[in-house]
Amino acid sequence: MEGLMGENIKIRQLRREDVDKMKCWAMHEDPLYFHYNFPEMNEEQSDEWYEVKTKKLKRKSFAIENKEDDVVGYLSIRDMKWMKRESELGIVFDAKHMNKGYGREAIILFLEYYFNTLKMKSLVLRAAKFNKRAIKCYKSCGFEIVKEAMDEFEDQYSEIFYNPLYSQLRRLFIVSGGKKKTLYVHMKINKEDFYNKLKSLPTKMCVTVD
């Protein structure tokens, strides 16, 4: 793809060297978000991680850079249904670069590319209900809640489940069928809604050769 340039960030194809940069990201301090910490990996594991994120037919991944050319996040679309023209969004940021408006700008930039260039019709995502900051961001980008459901938590071995320091957080989870589950909010945006609701937003978009 060509690079998508906004006012504060740029989105481009994910490169192998980005993985090594992301391994230096700051760690989340809140145990509810430990599963967003970038994993410790050796060279071989890093190669495999990159292959999974970029070499599969139903997945595409992109790096998010700020004005200083720091890789501050990455974005993926997975489970791409080419007949239905729909996929699922995932987005992760370096903990030290959160709360700077990068997420909202990146999503709006990406939606323009997703609907206009990739010719997709809808995009879905899910977020744990306790992740109120993320849900607020997604709503501001035009996503709407379509349902809430108890789903398997992404990190089945989180410290939350065995460290007594985090025992008060266990009320957010249940165990069903041997799996830890929490309440997830499922959200969706389609092409028509995006252009009806968001084309007037002040986020500036342009395409530049990467």
Image (cartoon, rainbow, N blue to C red):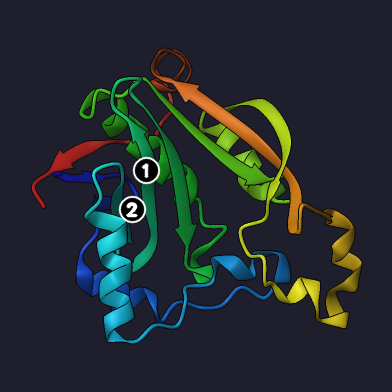
Relative vertical location of residue 140 with respect to residue 55 in this rendering, above or below: above
**C-alpha gap between disc 2 and disc 1:** 19 Å
> In the figure, is residue 96 to the left or right of 41?
right
Verify CB contact (< 8 Å) between mark 2 and mark 1.
no
SS class, disc 1: strand
What is the crowding at mark 1: few (fewer than 14 residues within 10 Å), some, or many (at least 20)?
many
At a point 51% along the width and 32% down the height, the residue shown is: 141
Q: Position of residue 198 (x, y in %)?
A: 44, 23
Relative vertical location of residue 4 with respect to residue 202 in this rendering, above or below: below
Q: Based on the displayed image, in which of its 4 quarters is residue 119 positioned?
A: top left
Q: Which amino acid does label 2 sit on?
A: Ile
Q: Based on the displayed image, in which of its 4 quarters is residue 190 positioned?
A: top left
Q: Where is residue 69 in the image (x, y as percent from the top left)?
A: 26, 67
Name the residue carrying label 2. 9
Q: Which amino acid does label 1 sit on?
A: Ile
At a point 34% along the width and 38% down the height, the residue shown is: 110
Mark 2 or mark 1: which comes first in sequence?
Answer: 2
Q: Where is residue 10 in the image (x, y as percent from the top left)?
A: 28, 52
Give the numbered dot on residue 77.
1
- In this view, the residue in front, 199 or 155, is 155
Mark 2 vs mark 1, foreground winner is: 1
SS class, disc 2: strand
**Residue at the front extreme of this rendering:** 177
